[in-house]
Structures are given as structure tokens and as C-alpha cells.
Image (cartoon, grey):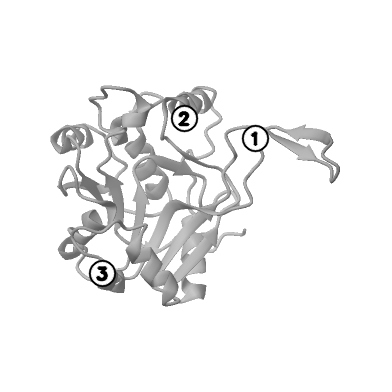
Amino acid sequence: MGSAGAPPDRPVVVLCGGRGTRLGAGRELPKPLTPIGGRPILQHVVELYAAQGARRFLLATGYRAPLVAEAVAGIAWPAGVEVACVDTGPDTETGGRVHRLRDRLDGEPFHLTYGDGVADVRLDALEAAHAAGGRTATITVVRPELPFGVADLAPDGAIVGFREKPRTTHWINAGFMRLEPDVFDVLDADCVLEREPFERLAAAGRLQSHRHDGFWACMDTYKDALRLNALWDAGAAPWAPVPAGGAAD
């Protein structure tokens, strides 16, 4: 994909309410504060947006919200970047967290993502896909690697080869979403964003996809944390901030 220029400076909502229980039993640290290279993963997420022109961030916090707010206050953010934490409740569902930020968004279109996923996604490409689709919401979708190898079978049942952790043929929600303010038509204080709201938008033809074939990873387990830290420590992190107009998607 060639550069289409920097995307407009739209607010970015980052969902930061997770507990991260699958990262370790008895976990005290909120999931968005899980470190990569000594920095919280939410900092990596904010900085990959900031490098592409975003300046205003709302972090929808939940589990141990004061700890997240304290960490955010201690980070030296890039010049001109404003990061505000909003406590949306420890047990609020994803759609409910967004719903609680409606007044803070003041009727503006906005970006939305998760505080535990990193990618080399290009925001200008996402903006272009959203504009071309003309729909309420656009979701970046990816085909992740399977966590195991697969056997290739011949029609007679013979195993003819193996492939180590190939990509699935199915597309999944990777976050990095672009939404219009009328998305609040399908949100309420208790909804799970990825269920009824998105299902209603899809049924009404109001949901667009943006296919991303580059790098994407979600820090969901301890193994994921080890992998992302290894990439960072090796200087091979594909999500490291790329300025608008940089490398292709």
C-alpha cells in the first residue's frame, strides 16, 4: 500500500480494563501495564498511533484503574500528545466502556482499539478503507497464525507433509477500528461490543472490514508476553512506531 498521507487527528479510545488472568495466576498487575521491553504494552499502543498523527487519547480503564492512571501520569509522552484515563468500572463490558465515553467524544468520529494488541497497521490505509466503505464502523481484520503445526493429507489418508503454524484462512477482529458517532445507536451501558452491537451493524450493512496482512499480535498469555519481549529485545518489533507515510502496510 502506498502512502495516502497522515490520517486526521481523531480521538483514539483504548480499552484498558482487562485483568490479564491468563497471563499468570493470582495476577495483580492490570493487563495494559504488562511490560514489553520495560514499558507497558498500552504505551506501545499509544505510541504507534501517535507516530501516525494521533494526538488525543482516552484510556477506558477498569481493573485497578488508579494503578493504570498512576503509570500513565509517569510516562513521558511524545510532544503534543494528550492521554487521559477514564475509570469505566472494573466489571464493565467492552461496549459499555465505550458507551461511558460518549460525552467525552463530543460527537466526533473516533478510533478504537484494545490495550493489549500491537501491529504494523497503517492508519491512513484504515481511513481509506473506512471512507470507501461509507459505513458506521470499520474493523481491522487479520488471519492469525495457528498455535500449532498442521498435517497435509492426501485423499487416501496419507500424510504428505507438515506445515509449522500456518495462518488460518479465517479473518478475526484485530482491533484498530474506525467509528462514526452513530455507533452509539447500538451501544448501551451493559453491552459487549463484539456481540450484539457488531452483529446488529453487520445485519444492517453498516460494518466494514479492513484487511491487514502484516504483523499483528495480542498479549493474551504468558507465552505471548515472552514472544513480544523477545522481538523487542532483538530490535525486531514490527509494531515499532512508523511515521505517517512510512513503510507499506
Q: Does the image show residue 206?
A: no
Q: Does the image show residue 63?
A: yes
Looking at the rendered structure, which numbered label has been put on residue 184?
3
User: Label 3 neighbourhood size at 10 Å, few (<14), some (14-19), many (20+)?
Assistant: some
Please provide percent x and percent y for residue 31: 30, 34
- Looking at the rendered structure, the kind of residue marked 1 is Lys
Q: Residue at x 42, y 30 (%)?
A: 221
Q: Residue at x 69, y 32 (%)?
A: 164
User: Label 1 neighbourhood size at 10 Å, few (<14), some (14-19), many (20+)?
Assistant: few
Q: Nearer the viewer, mark 3 or mark 1?
A: 1
Q: Earlier in the sequence, mark 1 or mark 2?
A: 1
Q: Residue at x 79, y 40 (%)?
A: 153
**Which residue in the structure is indicated by mark 2?**
224
Q: Residue at x 43, y 74 (%)?
A: 203
Looking at the rendered structure, which numbered label has been put on residue 51?
none
**Which residue in the structure is indicated by mark 1?**
165
Nearest the eye: 189 or 81: 189
Question: Is there CB contact under 8 Å for labels 3 and 1?
Answer: no
Q: Earlier in the sequence, mark 2 or mark 3?
A: 3
Q: Quadrant of residue 193?
A: bottom left
Which secondary structure lies at badge 2?
helix
Could you tell whether 14 is left or right of 199 in the image? Answer: left
Could you tell whether 32 is left or right of 226 in the image? Answer: left
CA gap, disc 3 to disc 1?
A: 39 Å
Please provide percent x and percent y for residue 93: 25, 51
Q: Earlier in the sequence, mark 3 or mark 1?
A: 1
Q: Decide: is 25 above or below 88.
A: above
Question: Is there CB contact under 8 Å for labels 2 and 3?
Answer: no
Please provide percent x and percent y for residue 168: 62, 46
Q: Decide: is 72 above or below 55.
A: above
